[in-house]
Amino acid sequence: MYQAKDQGRNTLCFFTPRMQADAAARSALEAELRVALQRGSIEAWFQPVVDAAGRITGAEALSRWRHPARGLVPPGEFIPLAEQTGLIQQLGRHMLRLACDQLVRWAGSRRTSHLIVAVNVSAREFRHPDFVGEVVRVLEETGAPPRRLKLELTESMLLHDVQESIARMNALKTLGVGFSLDDFGTGYSSLAYLKRLPLDQLKIDQSFVRDVLTDRNDAAIARTIIALAHSLGLDVVAEGVETEGQRSFLLRHGCLRFQGYLYGKPMTGAAFEALL
């Protein structure tokens, strides 16, 4: 069925032994993912976000599945599966709680109390009627400081219903929760909508950063996003920064926050703290 869906409507696919094996493997992985979520085998790893001076100001929380037999399962393998099966909502709640638990630990130390943790929110989570209530409950149950939590949203989920998106964001912003527009520039958002959204930050997608030194179009897009963020009074973060040359270009044009392998891959909370 998934093979036919991938190839489009009105497509006939014959069920081959290979497809049967793939379907069985997928079904087994789905069952294991359900168990992993129940047992807490999904971990939060943290990728540093740094300022222009190279100081770590926060992190993006990213899910990692520590499988008992396979070791670390790549997120590119289990996150699409979670989206297809509806487990993404449960995974999102789990990651939010892990991030808030980490914020509580960091809030107890002067060395880490300034850190902001960003958590990705899926479209299914954001559109759920109790999304705001769920975030509030996790904050209350963990005791995490709302002003240290940033939720990362994408253009497509916000434009699905702009008025409802604004209402949900404002309900959480009154508590101090921040919002970042992730992968900015890869969608088709209207600038008229963008200026209405109660955002705090734009993130330049790594696809524009990768060739920013060699591709004139990518360079122009990066400069435009930075200028747009400044004109709207928003913070801007460049994702996928891997070289000093990329950082220098972005800094020269006004980007003051960076995330990418130049500063560190996603890592455990303990490894992250060792960087500080």
Image (spheres, helix red, strand yellow):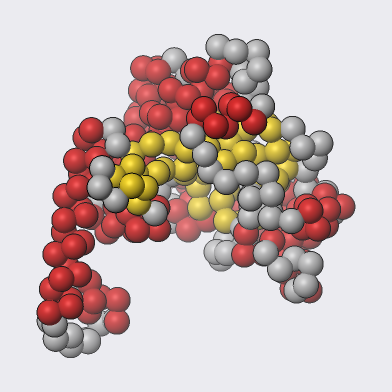
Residue 6 vs 79, above or below: the answer is: below
Q: Residue 33 in the image: x percent, y percent? A: 24, 47
| Residue 169 x %, y % | 50, 37
> Is the residue 112 above or below the residue 257 in the image?
above
Please indicate whether residue 63 sits to the left or right of residue 85 in the image: right
2 is higher (above) or lower (below) than 155? below
Task: Tally the numbered discs.
Answer: 0
In the depicted structure, whether residue 171 falls above or below residue 78: above
**Left or right: 266, with 95 as reference point:** right
The quadrant in which the C terminus is found is top right
Expressed as whole percent of the image width and height from the top left, the position of residue 203 reads 63, 50
Residue at 14%, 64% in the rendered image: 24
Q: Please give the name of the residue rendered at 13% of the width and 82% of the height, measured from the top-left corner.
A: 16
Residue under the point 16% across and 68% down: 23
Which residue lies at the image location 29% right of the left edge and 57% below the top edge? 81
Q: Position of residue 56 (x, y in %)?
A: 69, 33
Res. 96 visible in picture: yes
Query: Considering the image in quadrants, where does the N terminus appear?
Result: bottom left
Can residue 129 be seen here? The reply is: no
Judging depth in this view, the residue of 111 and 84 nearest the camera is 111
In the depicted view, which residue is nearer to us: 33 or 99?
33
In which quarter of the view is residue 41 placed?
top left
- The single residue placed furthest to the right in the displayed view is 252
Q: Which quadrant of the structure image shows residue 80?
A: bottom left
Is residue 248 left or right of 72 when viewed as pictured?
right
